[in-house]
Every structure is written in C-alpha cells, then in structure tokens.
C-alpha cells in the first residue's frame, strides 16, 4: 500500500488545508505511523490499546486463512439478478492495513461505540477533539471544504475519523439515550 501511495500522481489533489476530501490512504499512513511510534505491529497495538479496554476479545484484523463460523460475505447491487444482489468482488482484508480490514461482530460494534464514547478508550479531551469538526486554513469547517454534492448529500462535517451531523453532535448523550455509556 505504501508503494502504491508513493506512486500516486498527482501526489496531492489540492493544497493541504484548502479543501477536504475523504481518503483511505491517510489511514494507511496513520497506521504505519502508529506502528513506528509504538514499536508494535498494528494488530498487537489495536488488541492491547483498543480492543481489550473496550471488551472486544473476538474483534481482530481479518485474515482470510482464519476459520470463522458465520463469517459474512459482502454483496453488491445487480440489475441483472432476480434478487437485485450479487456477491461483491473479494478483496483481501489484509490489504487496507490501518484503513480497515477489521472483523467485529454486530454486538462488538455496539460495545465499541459504548466504550469509545463512554470514556473507556480515549481521555475526555481526546474524545472532544475527535468529534470536533476539522478546520481548513481559512477556519471553515470540513463540510465547507467538501465537494458540493458531498455537502448536500452528507450534511456533515468530519472530525478525526468520524462524520459529524447535526443529529449526532452529542455522541455521548445520544448513546446514553439508547442506554449505553454514561
């Protein structure tokens, strides 16, 4: 992935801080930085610092060699199939590194939200920073730096790894209303 990112042309879509666009490549780079800074592989780092504190013992980076009862396969829309669905093209979950490839259960996704927004994973100040809209150089939020179709379709800003919509700005309060967290 790093070799592929290095060969991207052009290297930048726009001057940093002038616009905003989602990019999985940034999460790949962030994963590599986390590995270097911690001295641990990403799998071990996530297991020790994220999954265990959140009580997610069976969440892991997916490996196609693992035997996983009930493993789900993805689908895509198909206009030619009677059901309207077809099997999605298989992509090795080991390729995205820090950009994904995790294998949680549905219950673990709920537990992760509870742990993350309930203060068991991040310090309060870090969580506050994570859910604050990103800012461009001119102080506009990320939403106003997005392409117009994204601005209209998403109606969201972007923080540190999360989209922030008018209906979910208070994540902790939202989760508390569902019975999760403090």
Image (cartoon, rainbow, N blue to C red):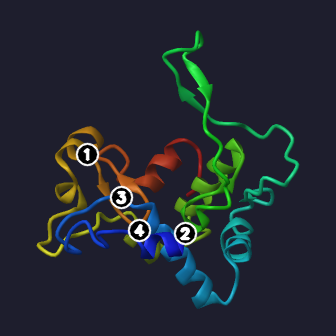
- The residue to which callout 1 is attached is 150
- The residue to which callout 4 is attached is 130
- The residue to which callout 3 is attached is 22
The outermost residue toward the top is: 82
Q: Is residue 135 above or below residue 157?
A: below
User: What's the distance in space between the residues labelled 2 and 4, CA to CA?
Assistant: 26 Å
Q: Nearer the viewer, residue 87 or 154?
A: 87
- How many C-alpha atoms fall within 10 Å of the one at disc 3: few (<14), some, or many (≥20)? few
Q: Quadrant of the C terminus?
A: bottom right
- The residue to which callout 2 is attached is 1
Residue at image location 71% in from the left, 71% down from the top: 43
In the picture, measured across the screen, residue 3 lies left or right of residue 72, that is left
User: What's the distance in space between the residues labelled 2 and 3, CA to CA?
Assistant: 17 Å
Asked if the residue under mark 3 is in contact with the one under mark 1, i.e. CB atoms within 8 Å, the reply is no
Q: Position of residue 33 (x, y in %)?
A: 53, 83
Closer to the chain start, of discs 2 and 3, is 2
* Local secondary structure at mark 1: helix
Q: Is residue 90 above or below residue 143?
A: above
Q: Quadrant of the N terminus?
A: bottom right
- How many C-alpha atoms fall within 10 Å of the one at disc 1: few (<14), some, or many (≥20)? some
Q: Position of residue 25 (x, y in %)?
A: 45, 66
Closer to the chain start, of discs 2 and 4, is 2
In the picture, measured across the screen, residue 154 lies left or right of residue 101, that is left
Residue at image location 66% in from the left, 57% down from the top: 102
């Amino acid at each position: 992935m790093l070799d592929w990112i290095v060969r991207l042309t052009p290297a930048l879509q726009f001057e940093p801080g002038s616009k905003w666009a989602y990019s999985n490549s940034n999460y790949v780079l962030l994963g590599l930085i986390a590995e270097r800074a911690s001295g641990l592989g990403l799998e071990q780092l996530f297991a020790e610092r994220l999954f265990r504190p959140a009580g997610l013992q069976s969440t892991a980076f997916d490996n196609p060699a693992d035997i996983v009862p009930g493993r789900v396969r993805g689908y895509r829309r198909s206009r030619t199939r009677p059901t309207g669905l077809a099997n999605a093209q298989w992509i090795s979950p080991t390729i995205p590194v820090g950009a994904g490839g995790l294998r949680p259960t549905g219950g673990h996704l709920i537990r992760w939200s509870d742990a993350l927004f309930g203060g068991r994973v991040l310090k309060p100040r870090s969580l506050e920073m994570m859910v604050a809209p990103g800012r461009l150089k001119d102080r506009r939020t990320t939403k106003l730096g997005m392409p117009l179709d994204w601005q209209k379709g998403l109606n969201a800003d972007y923080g540190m790894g999360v989209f922030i919509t008018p209906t979910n700005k208070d994540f902790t309060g939202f989760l508390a209303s569902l019975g999760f967290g403090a």
